[in-house]
Image (cartoon, rainbow, N blue to C red):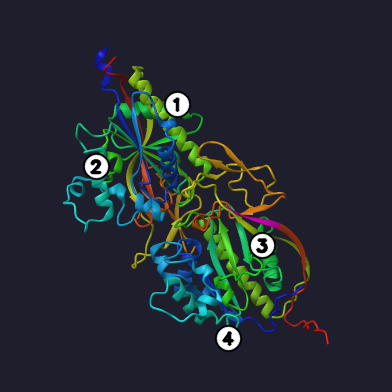
Amino acid sequence: MCSLPVPREPLRRVAVTGGTHGNEMSGVCLAQHWLRAPGELQRPSFSAMPVLANPAATAACRRYMDRDLNRTFTNTFLTARAHPDDPYEVTRARELNQLLGPMASGGAFDFVLDLHNTTANMGTCLIVDTAHNVFAMHLYRHLQMLSPELPCRVILYKLPKEESGSLNSVAKNGMALELGPQPQGVLRADLFTRMRALVAAALDFIQLFNQGTAFPAFEMEAYRVLRGMDFPRTEAGDLAGTVHPQLQDRDFEPLRPGAPIFQMFSGEDVLYEGESTVYPVFINEAGYYDKGIAFLQTEKLTFSVPALSMLAPAPTPGP
Amino acid sequence: MTSCHVFEDPIKKVAIFGGTHGNELTGVFLVKHWLENGAEIQRTGIEVKPFITNPRAVKNCTRYIDCDLNRVFDPENLGKKMSEDLPYEVRRAQEINHLFGPKDSEDSCDVIFDLHNTTSNMGCTLILEDSRNDFLIQMFHYIQTSLAPLPCYVYLIDHPSLKYATTRSIAKYPVGIEVGPQPQGILRADILNQMRKIIKHALDFIYNFNKGKEFPPCTIEVYKIMEKVDYPRNENGEITAIIHPDLQDQDWKPLHPGDPVFITLDGETIPLGGDWTVYPVFINEAAYYEKKEAFAKTTKLTLTAKRLCSSLH
């Protein structure tokens, strides 16, 4: 297994970003609050920097102005020559790459935690590229142990051979924190409080790591994204139906072949015709309608995560 | 005793509006579906027209392009000289008034149903503009009875300063239909099925009325708007407190003086002032942040309608 390199040094340059999507209000409001009063983000070994990632979309209370910022941190966009007609988010991605990156360089931030909301009934989830990110898996474990009564789930989002394009990919390490359900443009106190507590706990974890705490190996489950599933559509490309009531709000529950997934406007049901059980996530997420995604199919994986400690000797590479 | 009767002409022209707010998707997709296949909304003797009111906002999946279409059907905006410089929604309002009005004229549409969604936990809600409209009180009573045990609330916006100039107000009988909670930009099957049932029962009522069915006197409970409440804000206009978790999702339920209303970012609870119990609605509606409305206070009233029958029978 090709694990991401475990940090050898304390993580000192940490950022918490909100408003990457301008209508996901928990992160927007927290970032704006911390920009005025950053004390909450300080720990003995570091101070996390709050960033409002997409100020124009935030002001307009939209997901984005010209294109999805969280799909724009790719090599192609970041290295292309700047042009006055560039989409707003391409320009902004380059600015953030300067601030928090440059991507894949020694000068990049150590860790970026990017705050999101979903309209799907996903509770608390962490979105990480791959299971090889040992540091992220231990951070997950820490958050889950703090509040065992509320499930926290991990989604492995990166499809093989695809660049993630996510904001947190500009840093050496990072993840997205996704809380739902919350409508776009609405701030719910329950999710706001939860996100604030989770960010505090994540920063506490980094502090523990920085001061040399060792974290033992453990087993965990995660949901790996396989593919998207589009809505049924008319010939003109319009929706011809919507998520079936029996699937709505059932994120992370098993979806078996033959179960209803869509209800057509004409009344009939569309059944899931896959050959194996999958675990749908992002069911009926508002931000995915224009991406042609009614939900994402995932598979549930179980794997072991090695122990983590900054002071542990590096595994000796072969001669 | 005939003095207790209200005789009304049969209903000939009905319109169903969707997409007055382009990101409230239930009405958008029901209307689009009925434009393709309208059998479900046809009733003998009645012309029922489904219609997308704000196609540009629908295309962009935003509430509006330049201004809120559901606030510009006042004489001033409808009377403005048509020009490319007018906001898109004002131009569109004039077109709609031409097609389905003119407002306050003999030619206007008899009934307009305007389909909306809210992010608030309001369930099925019918919006009444005039407390003395016996025909609509009878219709709402019929819908409530038909939907039971599913609750269906009536929001009365008859108020000297808080009533607004709605798209449906060009009809003789304007009906707002608001179903929630549903986030903007998504379509939930449960909400869609509820709205579809409301329209079915409403059309059945009109059909029965036209056929000569008599509706005995009835009463309905309504929630009348009293006041809009804004979020606490700082000097820059930024929100400094949000809806308290105890109030979130508690639309239509009594809120007493001293009950928590907001919670500040520092964790301080702000209670309801005043001396009266109120019934809050539109709690934490996404579109009302910019309208400076965290929720609306209502008071509960009972309205009575006289016996109703069609004048042809």
- Is tag 4's residue or tag 3's residue first in the polypeptide sequence? 4
- Asked if residue B57 is positioned above or below residue B256 in the image, the reply reads below
Task: For the residues labelled 3 and 1, say whether their Cβ atoms are less than 8 Å apart.
Answer: no
Q: Nearer the viewer, mark 2 or mark 3?
A: 2
Determine the CA span between mark 3 and mark 1.
47 Å
Determine the CA span between mark 2 and mark 3.
53 Å
Quadrant in the picture for residue A308: bottom right
Taken as a whole, is the magenta stretch helix, strand or loop? strand
Task: For the residues labelled 4 and 3, say whether their Cβ atoms are less than 8 Å apart.
Answer: no
Whole-percent x and y of residue B202? Answer: 39, 29
- Residue beneath the point at 27% across and 54% down: B88
Determine the CA span between mark 4 and mark 1.
68 Å
Would residue B283 be seen by someone viewing this image from the given angle? Answer: yes
Disc 2 marks which residue? Answer: B97
Q: Quadrant of the C terminus of chain A?
A: bottom right
Nearest the viewer among B3 and B11 is B11
Identity, as a three-letter code, of the amino acid under mark 3: Val
Q: Which residues are magenta?
A: A295-299
Indicate yes or no whether the magenta region holds residue B191: no
Tell which subunit mark 3 falls on: A
**Is residue B219 shown left or right of residue B149?**
left
Task: For the residues labelled 2 and 3, say whether their Cβ atoms are less than 8 Å apart.
Answer: no
Tell which subunit mark 1 falls on: B
Neighbourhood count class around disc 3 (C-alpha, 10 Å): few under 14, some 14–19, many 20 upward: many
Disc 3 marks which residue? Answer: A154
Whole-percent x and y of residue B288? Answer: 37, 53
Identity, as a three-letter code, of the amino acid under mark 2: Asn
| Same chain letter for marks 2 and 3 | no
Disc 4 marks which residue? Answer: A107
